[in-house]
Amino acid sequence: MSKNINNPVGMGGGQRKKLSRAERQNNGPHRNLDRQGAADQKAELVRKMREKVAAAEGAGQPGDDTEQS
C-alpha cells in the first residue's frame, strides 16, 4: 500500500477526486446537510416555544396581579 496520500496506487486505483477547499477543511456537503438539519430542529423548537407563550398569554393568567417596575 502506498504511504503517500497523493498517490492512488494501492488505494483502489484510478484518479483521486479533486476536493474543493471547503471539503479539504472537512466542511463538505455532509456538513451542509448537518447544518440544514440543525436549522430545521431550531425552527421546530422556536415554533413550539412560541406556541407555549401564545397559549400562556391566551389563558390570560387571571391570578397574576403583581406590578412590575
Image (cartoon, rainbow, N blue to C red):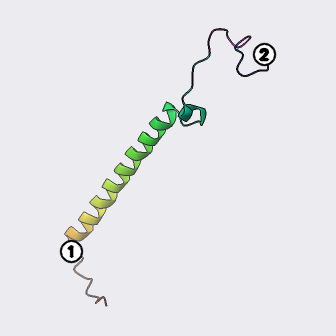
Does the segment drawn in magenta span residue 33?
A: no
Image quadrant occupied by the C terminus:
bottom left
Does the segment drawn in magenta span residue 12?
A: yes
Q: Is residue 45 left or right of residue 11?
A: left
Residue 40 picture location, percent across and down: 38, 44
Find the residue positioned furthest to the top: 14
Q: Is residue 4 above or below residue 31?
A: above
- The image quadrant that residue 66 belongs to is bottom left
Residue at 35% over, 50% down:
43
Label 2 packing within 10 angstroms: few (<14), some (14-19), many (20+)? few
Label 1 packing within 10 angstroms: few (<14), some (14-19), many (20+)? few
Q: Is residue 19 left or right of residue 60?
A: right
Residue at 40% over, 46% down:
39
Q: Is residue 9 left or right of residue 50?
A: right
Going by the numbered disc 2, the residue's amino acid type is: Ser
Q: Nearer the viewer, residue 13 or 40?
A: 13
Q: Nearer the viewer, residue 31 or 60?
A: 31
Q: Which residues are magenta?
A: 9-15
- The image quadrant that residue 2 belongs to is top right
Instruction: Report how far apart the C-alphas of labels 1 and 2 lie in the structure.
Output: 72 Å
Query: Which residue is identified by label 2?
Result: 2
Image quadrant occupied by the N terminus:
top right
In the drawing, what numbered circle is on residue 60? Answer: 1
Q: Secondary structure at mark 1?
A: loop
Residue 45 picture location, percent across and down: 37, 53
